[in-house]
Image: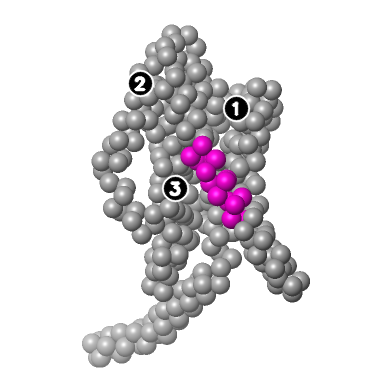
Amino acid sequence: ISGFIGIPNIRYYFVFLCFIYILAVVGNTLVITVITLDHMLRSPKYIAVFNLAFTDLLSSSALVPKVVDIFLFNHYYISYNDCLTFMFFCFTSIYASKVMAIMYPLHYQMRVTHKLILSLIAFSVGLLNRLSFCQSVIIQSYYCDHGPMYRLGCNDVTPNYIFAVLTIVLVLGFPLAFIVGSYCCIGYSLSKISIFREIVKAFKTCTGHLSLVAIYFLPFIFVYAFWHVIHPNARIINLSIATVLPPMLNPIIYVLQTQEIKESLRRLLKARVQAKLEVFRFKPLFLLTIRKMMQKFLV
């Protein structure tokens, strides 16, 4: 895997990746913990938020630690079976699980069955397993990506190309079209509001989401629109940033800014502090009782 090889001062970028990964783990774990402990956050809205945080945690953990291990510790060589396994976990956590968790949060356990998981494994691995690699074995990416791998095949790669196009349309095209359509409706509704303060308030609400959409979609659009002229290093940096930043930003933009989550954190911290105070209050009384019992025993 030769993705980051040859990029100047790339070790600083790995420090950045580690920092982003730590923030993503802490933020998403905090969201999962708060929703789990607070029974008032069991509405469908927060079930979807829980699934988002869980899949973000999986996607970061499936990708970033292995990427850092490969390039920071010079473990560039990877076996074929390990590469397929790496690709499967990255694809499943980044795309399949996230789509299911967000689209069907209340039916997640029924839809994500063992049969579906086995089908995903057979399909994703089978497409590459049918190829023969008789020339280069150098993957021009920062992980075992489907596109750079199938281009190394010596036999017919048409099914892999069709799968790649369908994946781009499903993961990028449909969500982007839906988001653009939604904001066109929002803009039309805002045009009917005559109070400027309400317009500013609505715009502030949308700013965080728009920034996250831009961080995720713009690098992909840039890479796929100019893939024939863009430098491979620029492609790799753009795609890696678009992959690792959203799991870190999602808890900040979508969750930790909501009033319900803030109130829940206050309640949990207050209960924690009160529990510690009760322990400290009980401890001197307990020690005093033990001391009196010991004195009576010694007398």
Asked which secondary structure carries label 1, the reply is loop
Indicate whether residue 234 is drawn in magenta: no
Q: Quadrant of residue 133?
A: top left
Whether 279 is drawn above or below 100: the answer is below
Start and end of the magenta stretch? 169-183
Residue at numbered disc 2: 129
Instruction: Judge by depth and name the residue closer to the eye, 202 or 244.
Output: 202
Would you name the residue on which mark 1 appears? 4
Identity, as a three-letter code, of the amino acid under mark 3: Lys
- Tell me where residue 187 sits by quadrant: bottom right
Q: Quadrant of the C terminus?
A: bottom left
Label 2: which secondary element: helix
Q: Residue at the location (30% across, 35% down)? A: 119
Task: Confirm whether residue 1 shows in the render.
Answer: no
Q: Which residue position holds label 3?
A: 98
The span from disc 3 to disc 2 (Cα, nearest Å) is 25 Å
**Residue 61 screen position, x and y as percent:** 46, 43
